[in-house]
Amino acid sequence: MDRILLVAAGLAGAAGVALAAAGAHIAGAERLATAGQIAMAQAPALLALGLYGRSASRAMLVAGLVIAAGLLVFAGALAFHDLSGSAALAFAAPWGGTAMILGWLALGVAAVIRRR
């Protein structure tokens, strides 16, 4: 098991539910709902990588950390925008989304080149 990824999975799942609920109940908070959906989509992957843990290659673990970091930046920027009304961090959302995409691509590459 890799505890960092398991913690990230738990936090992503909890944040996903909370953000989706807030997005459903706060008028005009579509970004919160989107952040929640993305968090809930990444949480199972982080959980699987965390449970795969030490048997995973270092590249797979790094890919999981990149996905988690991207999620934090992406969802954080969207939540900040809706909750504060400020677009000051709007530039960060594409960076977070790009990091998640790169993390997923790195995971695929790591699976192909995995040591035997």
Image (cartoon, rainbow, N blue to C red):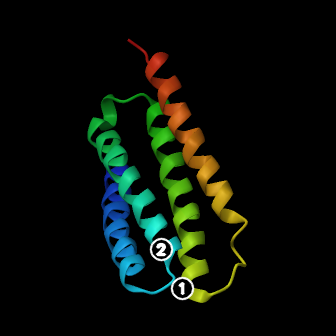
Q: Is residue 86 left or right of residue 1?
A: right
In the displayed structure image, the side of residue 3 where residue 106 appears, left or right: right
Residue 96: quadrant of the picture: bottom right
Reading the image, the residue beneath label 1 is: 83
Please tell me whether mark 1 sits on a helix, a strand or a loop.
helix
Q: Residue at x 31, y 52 (%)?
A: 6
Residue 2: tell me if it is visible: no
- Measuring from the top left, give residue 115's x and y in whole percent: 43, 15
Q: In the shown orientation, is residue 85 left or right of residue 110? A: right
Badge 1: few (under 14), some or many (20 or more) residues near its Cα, within 10 Å? few
Disc 2 is placed on an element classified as: helix
Three-letter code, disc 2: Leu
Q: Position of residue 116 (x, y in %)?
A: 38, 11
Image quadrant in which the N terminus is located: top left
Identify the residue at horizontal 37%, vertical 71% (top origin).
20
- Name the amino acid type tagged 1: Leu
Q: Which residue is mark 2?
A: 32
Q: Nearer the viewer, residue 76 or 22?
A: 22
Q: Vertically, is 74 above or below 63?
A: below
* On screen, residue 107 above or below 114: below
